[in-house]
């Protein structure tokens, strides 16, 4: 078994502060609002809270453009509120991790203001500057993720600065040891306050490559530099230094956002010696519905490809790293709307998706509202959009390009980050219990039906299912530490796998369709030694008939040492009998 760690055994809940709960009646979520909901989060069974940025920011990227790493944006409260939040979180036995955004700052950060003041300024080298290409053009054809060139001209010095996201987010220069020391010192001060770790924003991109040459151009009109940047091995050096200088001596959790990372890199980033990160978010499964126009299309994620990608990461990091499991975050549309059913089977599919993810190996993340089965929004006017990425894409593809307005609004309603950022639906009142004022962003009209108040005391609600999932994780080591073995990997309707640990087997099968299906479990899971641990279907016929209801998820726990009527060798010696691809259903005849 892998070494036991509290962060492996934890369920993490992500809070996107401006949309979580408005405590002071200004239409924006804030720290007092979060404090008011801590009992709800403890009751859910969350172990760790991850706070998206709460620092002062001009707000060009909803707080991911930071102008002061060590203060609280007044929209959210002040440092006293933060300290109260931390103390109240700890008082409930939960931990709190904060967002560390050190790939870039805001242009309003004092470092950048100083750097911009002249070529000889001591902070100049905290950022990445290049002379123009001939004719005054940007130094290369790299594109910014939120549209346009990755370079902006600084008129005063005549040089360009690099920004992989928006022009308001200049890249920090990690080559500079002074910058790195400033960052580590800042982290030490947060740790001294008592935070329990960091979620590290686009950490795989901090080390820039030596090769700044042009690359192949995509539909955006630019080269997407992320792969080249993410491939720079120096990131490992920096993270090892960070571990030593900032984190050593603290029992904390680190999760890195590893955009464009490879399995090999992730293995090194999360290697069990713990000298870099504890776990990473990889995005291969999130990008399976992309295309030439980036995410702006109406493609869906093909289940077979999803299964292969998940199996690749599950097996690829087994005993050599650790996965962060997620279907949702503040940058993704709601998974329920992507792979589930927003209609008749909304609750069933929300629970099925949850079971499918939470029973895999890794630390599961719940993104606010996911535990209620919140869905995407229908955006009908570009004015409703708050995210710069969506607004720029609308401009690029509709106003300057050739995607029809209605099509683009449909794509945005399917894929935009705005879908994740609509306020949390606490109750059915006009402000959804989120605010009494005009909300900073439209509330999804379906809050009258989908909301926490309605689910809190309803047996069978999505919320109660999530509570059950967190409870199972805390009760059964196999859920945390069991080896993942894919099952029926060629089946395009059911996502199934087993987990194996110390003679126990956990079998998970999830029907991703709106049809009832016959689907046989592996041998040895049909006897009296097997018991149904969880299903999202009140009158499940699975144990009796191996029949899955539409969007049903089933979790069965079996003790491999007794009661098996098959001739298979005992488990875990019989472990091989759970490997490989079979076509369930056929075996019943
Ligand atoms: C990360 C954040 C995202 C932000 C970007 C730039 O991907 O999750 O919200 O826009 O970094 O900071």
Image (tube, helix red, strand yellow):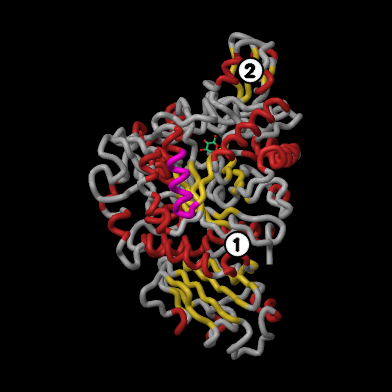
What percent of the width, then of the height, locates residue 580?
Answer: 66, 72
Q: Residue at x 69, y 30 (%)?
A: 180
Q: List x then y, in percent, for residue 431.
A: 26, 42
Tell me the crowding category of disc 1: few under 14, some 14 to 19, or many 20 or more residues within 10 angstroms, Cα based.
many
Residue drawn at x 68%, y 15% as measured from the top left? 122
Tell me whether the residue at label 2 lies in contact with that at label 1, contact meaning CB atoms closer than 8 angstroms. no
- Residue 160's tag is 2
The stretch in magenta equals: 83-94
Against 290, residue 461 (above or below) is: below
23 magenta-colored? no
Rounded to the nearest whole Å, what is the CA distance between mark 2 and mark 1? 44 Å
Queried on whether the Cβ of the residue with tag 2 lies below 8 angstroms from ligand 1, the answer reads no
Label whose residue precedes the other's in the sequence (2 or 1):
2
User: Which quadrant of the figure has residue 462?
Assistant: bottom left
Please indicate, yes or no, whether residue 301 appears anywhere in the rendered image: no
- SS category of the residue bearing label 1: loop
Between label 2 and label 1, give the one nearer the viewer.
1
Q: Is residue 88 magenta?
A: yes
Where is residue 355 shown, x and y percent of the image? Answer: 48, 64
For residue 45, which numbered disc appears in the image? none
- Location of mark 1 (residue): 361
Quadrant of the rendered image containing residue 136:
top right
Q: Quadrant of residue 43?
A: bottom left
Residue situated in front as seen by the camera: 479 or 161: 479
């Amino acid at each position: 078994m892998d070494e036991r760690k509290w962060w492996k055994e934890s369920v993490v809940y992500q809070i996107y502060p401006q949309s979580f709960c408005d405590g002071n009646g200004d239409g924006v979520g804030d720290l007092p609002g979060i404090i008011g909901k801590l009992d709800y989060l403890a009751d859910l069974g969350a172990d760790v809270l991850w706070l998206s940025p709460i620092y002062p920011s001009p707000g060009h990227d909803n707080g991911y453009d930071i102008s002061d790493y060590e203060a609280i944006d007044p929209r959210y409260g002040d440092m006293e509120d933060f300290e109260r939040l931390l103390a109240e979180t700890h008082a409930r036995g939960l931990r709190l991790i904060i967002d560390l955004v050190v790939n870039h700052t805001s242009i309003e950060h004092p470092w950048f203001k100083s750097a911009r003041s002249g070529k000889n300024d001591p902070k100049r080298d905290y950022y990445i500057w290049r002379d123009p290409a001939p004719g005054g053009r940007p130094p290369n054809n790299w594109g910014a993720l939120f549209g346009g060139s990755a370079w902006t001209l600084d008129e005063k010095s005549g040089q360009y600065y690099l920004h992989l996201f928006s022009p308001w987010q200049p890249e920090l220069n990690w080559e500079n040891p002074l910058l790195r020391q400033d960052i580590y010192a800042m982290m030490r001060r947060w740790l001294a306050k008592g935070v329990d770790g960091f979620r590290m924003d686009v950490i795989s991109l901090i080390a820039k490559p030596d090769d700044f040459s042009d690359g192949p151009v995509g539909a955006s009109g630019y080269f997407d530099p992320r792969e080249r940047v993410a491939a720079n091995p120096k990131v490992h050096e920096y993270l090892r230094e960070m571990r030593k200088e900032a984190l050593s001596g603290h029992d904390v959790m680190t999760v890195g956002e590893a955009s464009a990372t490879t399995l090999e890199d992730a293995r090194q980033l999360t290697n069990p010696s713990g000298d870099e990160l504890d776990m990473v978010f990889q995005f291969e499964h999130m990008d399976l519905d992309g295309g030439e126009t980036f995410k702006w299309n109406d493609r869906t994620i093909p289940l077979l490809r999803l299964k292969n990608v998940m199996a690749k990461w599950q097996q690829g990091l087994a005993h050599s790293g650790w996965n962060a499991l997620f279907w949702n975050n503040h940058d993704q549309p709601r998974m329920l709307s992507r792979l589930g059913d927003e209609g008749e089977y909304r609750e069933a599919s929300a629970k099925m998706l949850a079971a499918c993810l939470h029973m895999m190996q890794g630390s599961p993340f719940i993104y606010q509202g996911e535990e209620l089965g919140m869905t995407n929004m229908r955006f009908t006017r570009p004015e409703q959009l708050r995210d710069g990425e969506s607004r720029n894409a609308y401009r690029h593809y509709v106003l300057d390009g050739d995607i029809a307005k209605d099509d683009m609004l449909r794509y945005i309603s399917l894929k935009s980050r705005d879908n994740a950022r609509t306020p949390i639906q606490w109750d059915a009142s006009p402000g959804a219990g989120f605010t009494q004022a005009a909300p900073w962003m439209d509330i999804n009209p379906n809050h009258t039906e989908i909301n926490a108040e309605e689910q809190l005391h309803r047996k069978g609600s999505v919320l109660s299912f999530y509570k059950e999932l967190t409870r199972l994780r805390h009760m059964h080591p196999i859920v945390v530490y069991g080896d993942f073995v894919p099952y029926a990997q060629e089946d395009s309707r059911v996502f199934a796998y087993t987990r194996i640990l110390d003679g126990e087997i956990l079998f998970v099968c999830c029907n991703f369709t709106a049809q009832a299906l016959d689907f046989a479990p592996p041998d040895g899971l049909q006897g009296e030694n097997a018991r149904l641990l969880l299903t999202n279907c009140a009158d499940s016929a699975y144990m009796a008939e191996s029949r899955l209801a539409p969007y049903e998820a089933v979790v069965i726990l079996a003790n491999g040492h007794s009661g098996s009527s098959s001739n298979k060798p005992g488990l875990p010696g019989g472990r091989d009998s759970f490997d490989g691809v079979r076509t369930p259903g056929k075996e019943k005849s």
